[in-house]
């Protein structure tokens, strides 16, 4: 496999890094502390084409590729897990399903504003009773003349408070099980749509997470995404893509924690020696780096396979599982190497550790990833 | 209308500065960046492009890897790049460099409504000589230290920032302006711009391309043609932090200031 980055990808990495260091890092602590969505950063990212990286120019995208998108999320996550997930959820969970499943009219109507970042996207699948068991959807959609009527609620919706456009899953035929689930494009202004409570979270605290409520919500018939009854398939395909974004976020968090730890251990002196001179520090960082590098290969391989339209479902699951568990492990070790200072909010590693935990949970828990991987191996 | 911006790849002197035994900079051991003032010149050109739709050409003299810098400037929005690169040009000081760049700019062509822009000075040599020398060799009017640039028709109004104040000058195109960091904040490369950058035209002007220009005299280009001799190079000592007298009332601060100046026998 060729891991040689193109000239464009090398230049993109430089640009992402410069942007992240200059525009994102200075806000990371503040938006975490204040649980504030960094709208000003989103506006800047939109101007630079970071909200529609791998979509064609004809729909307002930047004309890039999936790896270039994963690298963007990775570089943002190195300094701020919150900003990374905003881009990931918007791109993978809203822009991608509309691009991959929408009619030409739907793509023309919704993608230009989403890909240019004028509007923010979100994805409504999870419900109080349908988390890992996504098939247990209770939200219903009933066709009445020229529109569907949606009733029910969604929870833990990333970008929920700020999004204008949502891809929402609902049951159109309860008796048909998974085959009775359909996907819809819902606009914030549709009658009967409202948002619920904002979740107070352990990490990624600047990102918006809230409930979506549908009370006789009127969704035009033409906003059915894909065919009726094909929503579960769309949701699973969307999550496959989303896992690349979250794996990239986890990868970036691990890399960012290593960067901070290398810097700190070269400065901090104990017993008359710099921490970096102790073998424990050296071995810990060597292990942390090896795992993170392996995670990067998995993430990049999954991104390249998606770009080539190969079956990447298992690759995305492996990338997310390994990168997420690596992020949790590496950030926890980083806090340990920092000692007492690492436990304070004076240094960013405790935030990185809090941010890393969610990567093992959302867009499919690590247990779900293991189910996907073992399923592909035929272990039943 | 087009704007030709002369840019330079320089070693990043914000970190540790490495010096060779002969007093020249050890460029190989330092990271290469785009000279900061040149980025302000490019941004000024791109702003005029945003307003007028003009073409922006970036030109640099340097070894082949400097082409990467030109691509980055194209990713910010420049339309074309010209790399001036030849063994014969190596080791040029400001006098020789400006001759070669003037010949290159002359070959690109300076039309009646064109502007040539440069950064004020490069952070490696800090001479601020190349821009003005290019203007002299091309017989162009020059305005240095531009802190604001407004274009109306063929008239450019430039606010120059000097040590003790501002000076506003009007100049007609074609002309050469040197730009300072107060002029603007350079934009980032954009994702779309990066994907377009490698499709934009990039020419290389080697010795053969420029040798027939009257300015390209073998005795006045390259190391042999450079009259500069470096006696010594050193890192200047860091200046101490300034003292701010902004607490308490004005009268007390004035008295304190007068006391400090008197102690130093300044007043």
Image (cartoon, coloured by chain):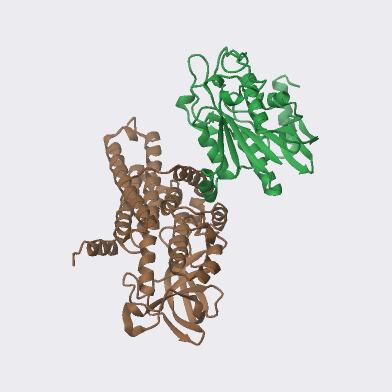
Name the spot of residue A89 as percent of width and height, x first. 44, 61
Q: Nearer the viewer, residue A194 or B8?
A: B8
Q: Is residue B61 above or below residue A248?
A: above
Q: Horizontally, is A377 left or right of B216 in the view?
A: left
- Residue furthest to the bottom: A145
Tell me if residue B179 can be seen: no
Q: Is residue A163 above or below residue B21?
A: below
Tell me if residue B207 can be seen: yes
Chain represented in brown: A
Name the spot of residue A63 as percent of width and height, x first. 50, 54
Q: Nearer the viewer, residue A163 or A286?
A: A163
Q: Is residue A93 above or below residue B121?
A: below
Q: Nearer the viewer, residue A130 or B22?
A: B22
Name the spot of residue A211 as percent of width and height, x first. 45, 72
Q: How many marks?
A: 0
Q: Quadrant of residue A360?
A: bottom left
Q: Quadrant of residue B8?
A: top right
Q: Point out the image quarter for the C terminus of chain A.
A: bottom left
**Residue at (53%, 71%) from the top-left corner?**
A105
Q: Horizontally, is A99 left or right of A295 in the view?
A: right
Chain represented in green: B
- Residue furthest to the left: A379
Name the spot of residue A288 as percent of width and height, x first. 31, 44
Q: Quadrant of residue A369?
A: bottom left
Q: Is residue A7 above or below residue A194?
A: above
């Amino acid at each position: 496999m060729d891991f040689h980055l193109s000239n464009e990808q090398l230049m993109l990495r430089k640009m992402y890094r410069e942007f992240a260091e200059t525009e994102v890092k200075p806000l990371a602590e503040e938006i975490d502390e204040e649980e504030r969505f960094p709208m000003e950063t989103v506006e800047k990212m939109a101007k630079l084409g970071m909200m529609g990286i791998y979509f064609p120019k004809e729909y307002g995208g930047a004309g890039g590729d999936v790896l270039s998108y994963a690298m963007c999320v990775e570089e943002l996550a190195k300094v701020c897990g919150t900003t990374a997930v905003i881009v990931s959820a918007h791109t993978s969970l809203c822009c991608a399903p509309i691009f991959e499943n929408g009619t030409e009219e739907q793509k023309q109507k919704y993608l230009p504003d989403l890909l240019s970042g004028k509007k923010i996207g979100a994805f409504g699948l999870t419900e109080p009773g349908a988390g890992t068991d996504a098939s247990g959807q209770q939200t219903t959609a009933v066709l009445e003349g020229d529109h569907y009527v949606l009733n029910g609620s969604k929870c833990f919706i990333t970008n929920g408070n700020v999004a204008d456009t949502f891809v929402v899953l609902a049951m159109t035929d309860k008796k048909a099980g998974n085959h009775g689930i359909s996907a819809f494009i819902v606009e914030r202004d549709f009658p009967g749509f409202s948002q619920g409570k904002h979740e107070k979270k352990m990490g990624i605290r600047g990102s918006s997470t809230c409930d979506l409520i549908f009370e006789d919500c009127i969704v035009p018939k033409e906003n059915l995404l894909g065919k009726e009854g094909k929503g579960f398939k769309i949701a699973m395909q969307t999550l496959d893509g989303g896992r690349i974004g979250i794996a990239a976020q986890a990868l970036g968090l691990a890399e960012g924690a290593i960067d901070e730890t290398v810097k700190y251990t070269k400065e901090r002196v104990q017993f008359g020696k710099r921490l970096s001179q102790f073998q424990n520090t050296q071995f810990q960082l060597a292990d942390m780096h090896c795992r993170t590098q392996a995670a990067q290969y998995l993430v990049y391989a999954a991104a390249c396979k998606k770009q080539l339209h190969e079956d990447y479902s298992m690759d995305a699951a492996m990338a997310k599982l390994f990168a997420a568990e690596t992020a949790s492990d590496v950030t926890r070790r980083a806090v340990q190497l920092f000692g007492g200072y690492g436990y304070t909010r004076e240094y960013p590693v405790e935030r990185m550790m809090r941010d890393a935990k969610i990567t093992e949970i959302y867009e499919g828990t690590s247990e779900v990833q293991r189910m996907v991987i073992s399923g592909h191996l035929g272990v039943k | 209308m087009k704007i030709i911006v002369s840019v330079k790849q320089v070693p990043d002197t914000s970190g540790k500065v490495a010096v060779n035994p002969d007093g020249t900079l050890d460029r190989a051991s330092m990271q290469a960046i785009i000279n900061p003032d040149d980025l302000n010149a490019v941004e000024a050109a791109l702003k005029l492009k945003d307003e007028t739709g003009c073409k922006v050409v970036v030109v640099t003299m340097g070894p082949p890897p400097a082409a990467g810098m030109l691509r980055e400037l194209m990713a910010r929005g420049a339309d074309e790049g010209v790399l001036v690169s030849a063994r014969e040009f190596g080791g040029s000081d400001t006098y020789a460099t400006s001759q070669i760049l003037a010949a290159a700019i002359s070959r690109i062509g300076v039309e009646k409504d064109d502007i040539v822009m440069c950064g004020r000075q490069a952070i490696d040599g800090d001479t601020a000589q190349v821009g003005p020398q290019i203007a002299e060799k091309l017989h162009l009017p020059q305005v240095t230290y531009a802190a604001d640039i407004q274009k109306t028709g063929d008239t450019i109004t430039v606010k120059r920032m000097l040590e003790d104040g501002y000076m506003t000058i009007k100049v007609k195109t074609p002309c050469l302006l040197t730009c300072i960091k107060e002029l603007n904040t350079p934009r980032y490369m954009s994702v779309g711009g990066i994907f377009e950058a490698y499709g934009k035209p990039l020419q290389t002007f080697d010795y053969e391309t420029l040798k027939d220009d009257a300015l390209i005299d073998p005795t006045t280009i390259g190391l042999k043609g450079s009259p500069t001799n470096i006696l010594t190079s050193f890192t200047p000592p860091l200046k101490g932090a300034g003292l701010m007298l902004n607490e308490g009332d004005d009268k007390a601060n004035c008295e304190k200031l007068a006391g400090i100046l008197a102690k130093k026998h300044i007043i």
